[in-house]
Amino acid sequence: NSIFSSVLPAPEDPILSVYFASRDDPSPHKLNLSGGTYRTEEGKPLVLEVVRRAEKQLANDISRDKEYLPLDGLADFNKLSAKLLLGDDSPAVKEKRVVTIQCLSGTGALRVGAEFLAKNHQQSVIYVSNPTWNNHPNIFNLAGLSVEYFRYYDPKTRGLDFKGLLEDLGAAPSGAIVVLQACAHNPTGVDPTLEQWEHIRQVVRSKRLLPFFDIAYQGFASGSLDKDAQAIRMFVDDGGECLIAQSFAKNMGLYGERIGALTIVCESEEVAKKVQSQVLVVVRPMYLSPPIHGASIVTTILKNSEMYKDWTIELKGMVNRILSTRQQLYEAIQARGTPGDWSHVIKQIGMFSFTGLNEKQVRLIAKEFHIYMTFNGRISIAGLSSKTVPQLADAIHAAVT
Ligand code: PMP
């Protein structure tokens, strides 16, 4: 009789259950579009050339050891990650009021940031977009914050519910935390325009809300690292405070290295010092100090202007393949005369498309066509190729007619 016999099975994770269904499907034509990882035209995971080069360089450097990193991680990594986010000559960095801490990818940065806020911020309400990445509510609830939603996506237009968004943020209590995905919104692929960001900024600042940016796809929206950070830079340029959870999983293809950072922009150097000390209080009992390898890869690339340039070229290559696949999917759906307006497929931004397919249609497509997507109708465009686009277009056509 197990000591654990009273343990109940956890509720099914919706994304994992799609993954398992796909894994167990014996069809040779099966296609899993549920995950958010980049694939090549051949459907294979991609390790960037520049990452391979950085790893070789690191392996050959016998002066490197495997000692613990400090609690806040690799110092150069932190400096260069903040620069990548905030720009080469950010006044906030120069004024030493920016704290950056290496974390276990974007998820770890969100969790550390949330725990810090739960302990040190007077307001425990945190707003996330409806819908949002399905791990957001778990992360924030477990940290002890209480999750509320603001309107974001309008199913009718398959675009931004901008009016609803402004109304909900305008009605949020002063001091409330607002999670803003900086670019390539997951799961909708719908981003505010710069003009809309400016309105959002005004509401956030005038209501004294605390922005917590999540940037898991810098470079993946437009192909430009600077452009994709513009929303964040608008908020930093106004002199106000914010938190930023940053990930190198997607833009450097370092998913399994778990490398990212938490940056907190503070009002002054004095505040930044206190904030940093409290973030380290969160880190110490959680994992003591972060892993070396991913941070070393990122640092090697960000430090070396030639490698940096090669990275941006490879990043652009991934983005261009996604854009071209979007176009192919749109054209394939048009060519089949599928009812409805499918222009959202090319308008949406980043790795995903929120197709508008409902759960019944998603299940039918899985059963009849062996194509797997999340139940909210989200597909990873990065998981498609010229070869598989017709297969998906056939499936969509069958599901909606
Ligand atoms: N935020 C968003 C919006 C995401 O989509 C993801 C990855 N799916 C993450 C954060 C975290 O990813 P990671 O922990 O791999 O960096």
Image (cartoon, helix red, strand yellow):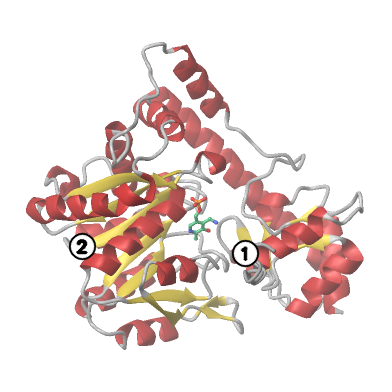
Q: Secondary structure at mark 1?
A: loop
Left or right: where 64 falls relative to 191:
left
Q: Quadrant of the C terminus?
A: bottom right
Query: What residue appears at the point 26 percent right and 40 percent down from the top-left corner?
Result: 88
Looking at the picture, how far across and down is residue 397, in whole percent?
85, 71
273 shown above or below 296: below
Say which quadrant the N terminus sits in. bottom right
The residue identified by callout 2 is 241
**Does the rendering let one see residue 195?**
no
**Residue bearing the label numbered 1:** 4
Residue in the foreground of this view, choosing between 32 and 288: 288
The kind of residue tagged 1 is: Phe
Q: Is residue 66 left or right of residue 331?
A: left
Q: Residue furthest left?
A: 270
Q: Quadrant of residue 6?
A: bottom right
| Residue drawn at x 82%, y 78% as measured from the top left | 400
Q: Is residue 10 above or below residue 72?
A: below
The answer for how far apart the CA atoms under marks 2 and 1 are is: 46 Å
Q: Quadrant of residue 243?
A: bottom left
Which three-letter amino acid code belongs to the residue tagged 2?
Answer: Glu
Q: Nearer the viewer, mark 2 or mark 1?
A: 1
Please give the label number shown on residue 212. none
Picture quadrant where residue 233 is located? bottom left
Within 8 Å: ligand 1 and the Cβ of disc 2?
A: no
Instruction: Tell me the residue at 22%/74% (across/down).
Output: 205
Residue lying at 68% horizontally and 39% vertically, measured from the top left: 45
Q: Position of residue 230 (x, y in %)?
A: 35, 56
Which comes before the other along the chain, label 2 or label 1?
A: 1
Is residue 272 visible to us here?
yes
Measured from the top left, where is residue 178 in percent x and y?
34, 72
Residue at the limit of the structure toward the front, as seen here: 1
Which sits in the foreground, 172 or 156? 172
